[in-house]
C-alpha cells in the first residue's frame, strides 16, 4: 500500500495547503479528492476540486500561474496535505502573491 | 461589520492553517466554526471544533502545548483562515513539532 492509498477521503474532500517552497509563505488553500491528488502527483502541477464550480481545475491552466510541485507532505491523521510549490506569478486571482493578504489581528 | 462577520461559514466549518510565526513552518490544520474563531480571537489561544469528538477543544489545555496567537489572516474568499502562533512544545500529538512530518513526494 502506498502512502497515497493511506490518505483518508472518508470525510470527503481533503484540504491542501499550498506553500512557497522557497520562503514558506502560505499561498492558498484548496480542496482535493483522490483523483485531483493523483493528477497532481502525476503532472507535478496542482489540481483541485472546485466546490463552487463542481469541476477539476489545474491551477494556472488559464492564467499561466502554474504551481510546480516540489515537495508533498501528509499530516498525522492522513486527511490534510501540504504541498510546497514553485509559484509562477501570483497564487491569488486578486493578483496578490498569496490569498492571505488581509490581516484581521 | 467587522471582518469576523464577513467570514463565510455557509459551507460549514472553515479550515484554519496554523503556522509558526517565527520560521513560517506549517504546524497543523484544524477546523473552526464561528464560536471557535471567536474564542480564539478573545483568548489569543487556538480553539477548534473536533469533527470526530464533536466538541470544542482548546489546543494545549491538556498537553500544555498552547498556541499563542500572534497574527490572523483571512483569504480572498473569506472561507479559510491562517493563524501565526507561538507554539509551545510540539503541535502534533506524535510529539513531532509539526503534524506534517511525513514527506510522500
Image: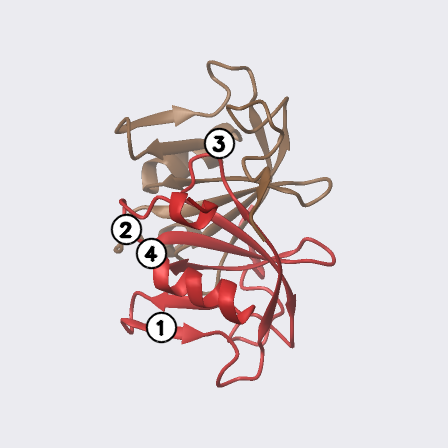
Chain colours: A brown, B red
Q: Are marks 3 and 4 on the same chain?
A: yes
Q: Are marks 3 and 1 in contact (CB under 8 Å)?
A: no
Where's the N terminus of chain B, which quadrant? top left
Q: Are marks 4 and 1 on the same chain?
A: no
Image quarter of residue B70: bottom right
- Please, what secondary structure does the residue beneath circle 1 have? strand
Q: Is residue A2 visible?
A: no
Q: Earlier in the sequence, mark 2 or mark 1?
A: 2
| Image-based side of B19 in relation to A58, left or right | right
Identified at 63% across, 69% down, the residue is B97
The residue that mark 4 highlights is: A8
For residue B65, above or below residue A10: below
Q: Chain of mark 3?
A: A
Q: Is residue B40 visible?
A: yes
Q: In whole angstroms, how far apart are the C-alphas of marks 2 and 1?
A: 15 Å
- Crowding around mark 3 (Cα neighbors within 10 Å: few <14, some 14 to 19, many 20+) is many
- Please, what secondary structure does the residue beneath circle 4 have? loop
For residue B65, above or below residue A88: below
Q: Chain of mark 1?
A: B
| Image-based side of A73 in relation to A31, left or right | right
Q: Are marks 3 and 4 in contact (CB under 8 Å)?
A: no
Q: In whole angstroms, how far apart are the C-alphas of marks 4 and 2?
A: 19 Å
Any mark on residue A46, and which? Answer: 3
Residue A72, position as x, y percentages in the image: 55, 46
Image quarter of residue B30: bottom left
The residue that mark 1 highlights is: B56
The residue that mark 2 highlights is: B12
Q: Are marks 3 and 2 on the same chain?
A: no
Q: In whole angstroms, how far apart are the C-alphas of marks 3 and 4?
A: 19 Å
Q: In whole angstroms, how far apart are the C-alphas of marks 4 and 1?
A: 22 Å
Amino acid at each position: 500500500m502506498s502512502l497515497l492509498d493511506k490518505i483518508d477521503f472518508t470525510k470527503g474532500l481533503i484540504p491542501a495547503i499550498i506553500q512557497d517552497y522557497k520562503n514558506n509563505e502560505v499561498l492558498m488553500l484548496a480542496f482535493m479528492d483522490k483523483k485531483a491528488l493523483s493528477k497532481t502527483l502525476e503532472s507535478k502541477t496542482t489540481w483541485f476540486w472546485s466546490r463552487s464550480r463542481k469541476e477539476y481545475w489545474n491551477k494556472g491552466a488559464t492564467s499561466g500561474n502554474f504551481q510546480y510541485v516540489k515537495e508533498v507532505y501528509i499530516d498525522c491523521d492522513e486527511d490534510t496535505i501540504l504541498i510546497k510549490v514553485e509559484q509562477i506569478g501570483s497564487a491569488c486571482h486578486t493578483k496578490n502573491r498569496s490569498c492571505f493578504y488581509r490581516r484581521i489581528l
